[in-house]
Amino acid sequence: MCTVTINIDETQVRKVNPALTSIESITRWAQQLVDACIADLAEAEEYPLPEGLKPYTIEELHERIRASEADFAAGRVYDFDEAMDMIEKELDEELEMAEAV
């Protein structure tokens, strides 16, 4: 058995879910969130990563974020429509190649 202490700002919680009007309802809500997180962790343990695949380290994630921010600042970005057009074009090309075989 494990005991976890969570500091909850009632005002912030009520902004997320105004129906939470009492400390008891907030506590139940927080317990459900914790239970969901534990279930996600258990599922992750049940389905390990494929061999050779490893998660990013925090440093790697921060580097990817820095690189993305630099790309954004330099204007190396696509809006949603441009990205969707590129994806559709690639899918069309792959479909054509598959049909040719």
Image (cartoon, rainbow, N blue to C red):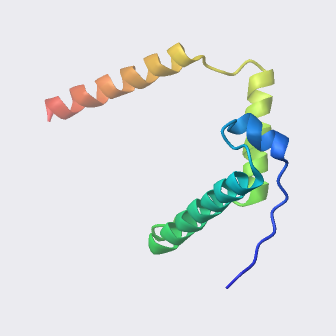
Q: Residue furthest top?
A: 81
Q: Is residue 94 above or below residue 33?
A: above
**Image location of residue 99, percent across then percent down:** 15, 30
Q: How many marks?
A: 0
Residue drawn 69% across the image and 44% down it: 20
Front in this rendered view, residue 60 or 3: 3
Image quarter of residue 66: top right
Q: Is residue 100 above or below residue 17?
A: above
Q: Is residue 6 left or right of residue 78?
A: right
Front in this rendered view, residue 71 or 81: 81
Q: Is residue 96 left or right of residue 90?
A: left
Residue drawn 29% across the image and 31% down it: 94
The N terminus lies in quadrant: bottom right
**Image location of residue 37, percent across then percent down:** 61, 62
Residue drawn 81% across the image and 22% down it: 73
Residue drawn 70% across the image and 35% down it: 18
Front in this rendered view, residue 34 or 58: 34
